[in-house]
Image: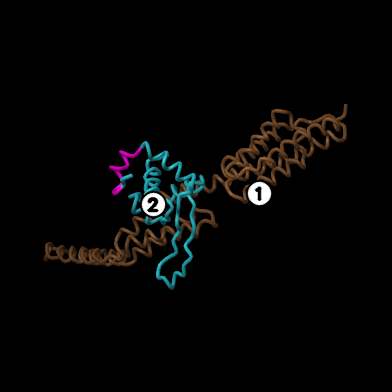
Chain colours: A brown, B cyan
Amino acid sequence: MRKSRIGAVTMLLVLIAGVLVVGGDASPTIVVLTVLATLLASEFDRSAYRLALVVLRIGACLLPHERRSDELHEWMDHARAAGDHGLSPLLVALSIVIRAAPPISLGVWTRHVLDRRLATRTWGALFGSAWNKHIAIYGRRRVGFRWIERSYVLSISLRGDLSLKTEAQFDAGSRHRRIADWVGWGFLDTSLEEELSRAVEGNLRGFAVKTEELAGLLQNARGGTADDETARPS
Amino acid sequence: VSHHTKLLLSVLLDAPGEESYGFELSQASGLPSGTIYPILRRLEDRGLLTSRWELLEESKEGRRRRRYYRLTGEGDRVARTTIAAQAPALRLLVPGWAS
């Protein structure tokens, strides 16, 4: 969809008309400046598409490295469709860079930060739960890490609600459950256990839920509690 | 859901199950180039859209690869629910929008 070089031709006509109108009264400086301006405009007109690509590349720098190439590839379609000459491709490029790049970039970075926060909470919860188990087994007073456990449970819920949509993520959910078993969710009090159940249900949402698996998990959680009661020092 | 998002959803609903690429969607919805991609990313992140890159040898075909978008089942349901209430206004705003 290439446009004709009507921009440059128009400018040339305007220049000729200007010279004719001004006639003999035009000073040499004005004439030279006008010619230079026209040449510049013509050059700009000729390389508008390339300039647009430069603008898009600069805009893509706002995005994380792994997203840059894909986004740029899509944006180029628009610049190309706007034509090779004139202001159109440049305006399209500016529109994309100003209006699309910042929100996309912000979204990606926000998710990145949230993921990191989630990871921190997850590892904190694992450490806290393991420490709790250690304390209980060796007969010392149980140190309360319930807020960490709670945040872990909530993080599982969050993942279940927001992103556990695919088979792979379902596997990730299973991994969470295995980790939860390993660190001894049996120490959770009743309300947290219920919370965990809800979280697991959240993780399974969107799939053909294997009810026996869920029942087994809940059974394990209840069995773990009973075992821990016996293991807990009197 | 913003007005622009509704416009885009209505265009995607026009051809349920079919794939469209970004520029095509921009043209069909009348949304500016800069507006459409953040919306597409948001919808994709929410699981309402899926996308895939076209398998194509660019040099052979003489054009760039395209990224095709399609509504997911959930996206289709959400779009229909969202659009239903907006039908009269969208009919005026989107050229050729009839359903």
Using the image, determine if residue A68 lies above or below residue A206.
below
Q: Mark yes or no: residue A117 visible.
A: no
Could you tell me residue B17's position as x and y percent? Answer: 43, 52
Could you tell me residue B76's position as x and y percent? Answer: 45, 45
Which residue bears the numbered disc 2? B15
Image quadrant in which you'd find residue A93: bottom left
Most prominent secondary structure in the magenta stretch? helix
Which residue bears the numbered disc 1? A171
Which amino acid is tagged 2?
Ala
Same chain letter for marks 2 and 1: no
**Magenta stretch bounds:** B86-96
Image quadrant in which you'd find residue A206: top right
Q: Is residue A104 magenta?
A: no
Query: Viewed as shown, does residue B6 lie left or right of B92?
Result: right
Q: Quadrant of the C terminus of chain A?
A: top right
**Residue in front for this viewpoint, A18 or A185:** A185
Which amino acid is tagged 1?
Asp
Using the image, determine if residue B94 lies above or below residue A30.
above
